[in-house]
Amino acid sequence: MSIKETIITAAIGANGKEATVGGMVAIVGSAMSVFLGGWDITLKLLIYAMIADYATGLLGAVKQKKVNSEVMFWGGVRKGVILLVIGLAVMLDQLMGNDSPVFRTLALYFYIGREGISILENFGHIGVAYPAFFKQIMEQLNERGNQSGKL
């Protein structure tokens, strides 16, 4: 195989099916990136936090022997809704004529914080140690959440 053929195969795949699947993934990924206001560090952090939350939640459920496919499904749906809210915040910024993404940034930071809190809770279920002041903060947040209905 020549260098030219190797480069072409690496770029588009060995056959038409690989090229088609790769093209579809690129189109969907690009559309999602545009819908979510671009692929910047805050969006990356949110996506990574969502993955970490899902993974640590699954590990905690396995450790406690409480794995439930319905809970996992609705957890995934919740993460999809979060991305929908980010997309709506992008549209709201566009509607308001904001040159800087104010609503998107607020939504991203809010959900990054929520995912971080959930990851810390999952660490507790798994048995990962963290500083005592985190535990106190988590207890306060849970108390406030129970008083107001939901955190």
Image (cartoon, grey):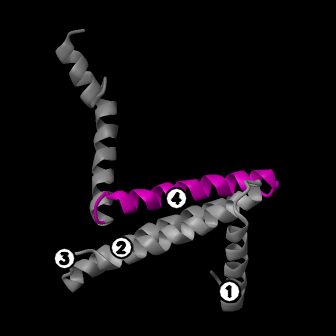
Q: Quadrant of the C terminus?
A: bottom right
The residue positioned farthest toward the bottom in the image shown: 148
Instruction: Let me know if residue 26 is in the magenta part.
Output: no
Q: Is residue 122 above or below residue 23?
A: below
- For residue 105, the mark is 2
Q: Which residues are magenta?
A: 37-66
Q: CA distance from mark 2 to mark 1?
A: 25 Å
The residue positioned farthest toward the top in the image shown: 1
The residue tagged 3 is 99
Q: Tell which circle, 2 or 4, labels the residue nearer the N-terminal end.
A: 4
Element class at badge 3: loop
Q: CA distance from mark 2 to mark 4?
A: 16 Å
Say which amino acid is labelled 1.
Answer: Arg
Q: Quadrant of residue 71?
A: bottom right
Element class at badge 2: helix
Element class at badge 4: helix
Residue 29 at x, y percent in the picture: 33, 52
The residue tagged 4 is 49
Say which amino acid is labelled 4.
Answer: Ala
Q: Is residue 59 above or below residue 120?
A: above
Relative horizontal placement of residue 82, taking residue 128 as reference (left or right): left
Label 1, residues with CA under 10 Å away: few <14, some 14-19, many ≥20: few
Q: Is residue 8 above or below residue 29?
A: above
Q: Quadrant of the N terminus?
A: top left
| Foreground pick, 49 / 34 | 49
Say which amino acid is labelled 2.
Answer: Thr
- For residue 29, the mark is none
Q: CA distance from mark 4 to mark 1?
A: 23 Å
The residue tagged 1 is 144
